């Protein structure tokens, strides 16, 4: 059997990543829909889980336009999950913060995501979970590094799920 060419491997990688992204996206939509919330609303709650953010920063983290953010926040405010208020450091700026109900909803969505990830890890061959996660983290780092040449800063707004520090490239 011949060794796959770099083009064959690149195509397989691209197909696998696209399938993985689609699968997680569909799973997230299904989980979030049962809570009566869209994926965008759940992402907003998650982004605000560690504290309030200025609206501009929140829009950057979510990768959405101000008008889309405004509509999204309006729906969350109507449901008493989020409040808008002045930024204590700049009265001209607005911040979005979770209400107590919003914190509970964010924790519920987070728990659903964690449960889904555990189901996936449980289906992997015994003892391969840590290695699989390390490979995926390395893949993300490689994607981030490769993206820097064409889209500098594209991942700067992302933080790791297990902590608050931004994902950084290795030097």
Image (cartoon, helix red, strand yellow):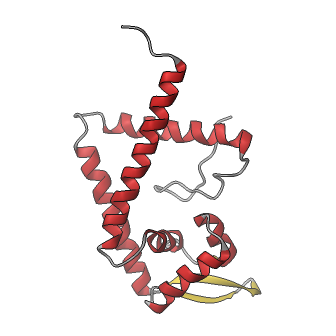
- Is residue 122 found left or right of 98 in the rendered image? left
Q: Residue at x 45, y 16 (%)?
A: 4
- Please tell me which residue is depicted at 64% across the width and 78% down the height of the picture: 67
**For this view, does 103 lie left or right of residue 58?**
left
Quarter assignment of residue 68: bottom right
Q: Measured from the top left, where is residue 111 in percent x and y?
A: 32, 65
The spot of residue 162 in percent (x, y) is 46, 55
Camera-side residue: 24 or 155? Answer: 24
Q: Nearer the viewer, residue 25 or 166?
A: 25
Above or below residue 39? Residue 88 is below
Question: Residue 165, relative to residue 133: is it above or below?
Answer: below
Q: Is the N terminus in the top left, top right, bottom left or bottom right quadrant?
A: top left
Residue 111 appearing in the image: no
Please state, as top left, top right, bottom left or bottom right, where the C terminus lies in the image: top right
The correct choice, above or below, for 108 with respect to 27 in the image is below
Residue 90's place in the image compared with 61, above or below, is below
117 left or right of 90 in image: left
Q: Nearer the viewer, residue 80 or 134?
A: 80
Residue 71 location, quadrant: bottom right
Residue at 61% x, 63% y is 63
Instruction: Point out residue 79 in the picture as x, y percentages from the top left corner.
Output: 43, 89
Q: Is residue 133 visible?
A: yes
Figure disc tally: 0
Residue at image coords 70%, 86%: 88
């Amino acid at each position: 059997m011949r060794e796959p060419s770099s083009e064959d491997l690149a195509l397989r990688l691209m197909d696998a990543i696209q399938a993985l992204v689609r699968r997680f996206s569909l799973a997230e939509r299904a989980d979030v829909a049962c809570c009566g919330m869209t994926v965008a609303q759940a992402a907003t709650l998650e982004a605000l889980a560690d504290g309030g953010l200025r609206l501009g920063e929140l829009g950057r983290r979510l990768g959405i336009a101000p008008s889309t953010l405004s509509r999204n926040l309006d729906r969350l405010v109507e449901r008493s999950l989020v409040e808008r208020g002045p930024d204590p450091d700049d009265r001209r700026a607005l911040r979005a913060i979770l209400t107590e109900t919003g914190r509970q909803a964010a924790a519920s969505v987070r728990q659903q995501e964690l449960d889904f990830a555990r189901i996936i890890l449980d289906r992997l061959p015994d003892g391969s979970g840590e290695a699989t996660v390390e490979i995926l983290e390395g893949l993300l780092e490689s994607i981030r590094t490769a993206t820097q040449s064409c889209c500098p800063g594209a991942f700067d707004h992302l933080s790791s799920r297990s902590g608050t520090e931004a994902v950084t490239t290795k030097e």
